[in-house]
Image: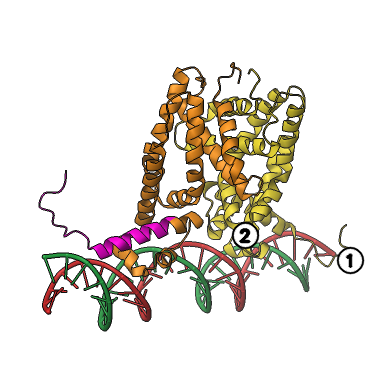
Chain colours: A orange, B yellow, C green, D red
Amino acid sequence: MTATRAKVPAKRADAQRSIEAILDAAIRSLSRNPEASVSEIAKTAGVGRVTVYGHFPNRADLVEAAMTRAIADGHAGLEAVDLSGDPREALARLIDSSWQLVSQSRSLLTAAQDVLSPGRIRELHAGPVERVEGLVERGRAEGVFRTDLPTTWLVGVLHSIMHSAADEINAGRLTPDVAADYIAATALSAFTPPSLAG
Amino acid sequence: MTATRAKVPAKRADAQRSIEAILDAAIRSLSRNPEASVSEIAKTAGVGRVTVYGHFPNRADLVEAAMTRAIADGHAGLEAVDLSGDPREALARLIDSSWQLVSQSRSLLTAAQDVLSPGRIRELHAGPVERVEGLVERGRAEGVFRTDLPTTWLVGVLHSIMHSAADEINAGRLTPDVAADYIAATALSAFTPPSLAG
DNA sequence: CTCTTGTCGAACACTGGTGTACGAGTTACG
DNA sequence: CGTAACTCGTACACCAGTGTTCGACAAGAG
C-alpha cells in the first residue's frame, strides 16, 4: 500500500548516497566495536556527525537500521543455499555459508542488544531462523534428527556453537579455516537421535 | 612467602566487614546489570561510594575482585562433585551442579569482559575449566567421548550450550527445571564419537 | 582513653558521550 | 539558473559516570 498523494518529496540522490554510506559505516564500525560512537561512525562514513542526525533521529534508530540491513543482506545470501537432499548434508552446507556471517556480525548483534528490546531483536532474526527451523523439522520428520528435544532448542544450540567457534578463534585456539568443519561435526552429533549410529 | 617486617598494619575488623559487604554487593549488582555503577554497588552494600574507593582503587579492580571471588566460591562448590565412574554420568552430574552457577553469573562475566583483558578472564577461569578438561580427557581415553575434535573445543561447546540455555530461558522458550536435562542430553550427544551408538 | 583507621556526605573536576541550534556553503533537481 | 534540499563545522546544553578532596565524625586496637 504505497501512500496516496505522497507528501514526502522523495530524498535527493545526494542524501541517499549519504544514508548508504552511513549505514555501511555503521555496520563496519559496530562490527569492530559494539559501542562505536556516532562520531566514529560518521567519520568512517566520511560524513559529518550532524549529517547522521539529519537522517537518523538518534543512535538507537541508527543501530536498528544497520542491524536490519545487515540481516537482510545476509539472509539474501543464505537463500541461495540448496536445502534439498539429505538434511545432514544440507545442514552442513547451510553452516558453511552462514557461520562466517554470524561471526562477522557478532559485535553488531551486541550493539543491537545494548539498544533494542529482546523482542525486537528476535523479530529481526525471524527470517533467517525460520529457514533453519524448516530444515531441522524436515530432518526430524525423516528420522535423521532427534525429536526428544524441541526444534527451537536445537536451533539455539547450533547458533551458540557458532558463537563458541568465534570465541575460540578470538582466543587463538582455533583457526578460521577448520571452524566450519568443527561446527558441522559438533552440530550433526548434537542433532543425532540418542539411539542412532552416526 | 609472607612479607617480612610487614609494614601493612593489617585491616581493621571494621574495614574487613565493609570489604565483604562491597564484594557481596558487587556480585549481586553486577549479576543483575553488568554495567552497574559504583554508586549502585555502594548503595547495595549499604556503604558510601567513597568507602568503596577507599578499598578498591577503581571500578575495574572492584569488578576483578568480585569476579575472582565468585569464581572461587563456585569452584569450591564444584569440587564436591564426584567425577569417578562412567564419564558420561559424571559429566551429567557436573552439568547439574555447574549450569545454574553459569547462568547466574553470566551478567557478571559480561561486566568482567567489559573491563578485563581476555587473557585475564581466561586466567580466572583456569581452575574450573581444568576440572572439566580432565573429565573429558578421561572420557576420550575410555572411548566414550570423541577424539576427532580437540578437548578445548568440546569444553568450549559445553560452555556455550549452557549460555544458550540461559538465553532460551530469558526468551521464555525454556523453563529452568528442564534446562539441565536438555544441556546434558545435548552435550552427551555432541561428545559421542561419530561412529558410536548412543 | 587515646590515637589511628575507617566511614560518610557533599562538593568538585574531568571525561566522553548524546542530541540540538545556527549559519555559511554546496549540490541536486526542475 | 534559481531554489530547496542537503552538508559541514562549531558551539552549546546536558547527562551520567569516574575518581579525588575535604572535614566532621564513628569505631576499633592497643
Give the residue number, with chain letter if any, for mark 2. Answer: B60
Chain ID at mark 2: B
Instruction: Identify which residue is drawn at 13% across, 54% down.
Output: A6
The residue closer to the viewer here, A21 or B71, is A21
Question: Picture quarter containing residue C4?
Answer: bottom right
Of the 4 image quadrants, the one containing the C terminus of chain A is: top right
Q: Amino acid at mark 2?
A: Ala
Query: Which residues make up the magenta segment?
Result: A1-27
Residue, far right: B4
Q: Is residue A166 left or right of residue A31?
A: right
What residue is shown at x 83% (from left), y 68% (from top)? B7
Q: Is residue A41 left or right of residue A159?
A: left
> What is the quadrant of residue A8 in the picture?
bottom left
Q: Residue A179 placed where, x, y %?
A: 59, 41
**Cα separation between marks 2 and 1:** 30 Å
Question: What residue does disc 1 label?
Answer: B5
* Residue A169 visible somewhere in the drawing: yes
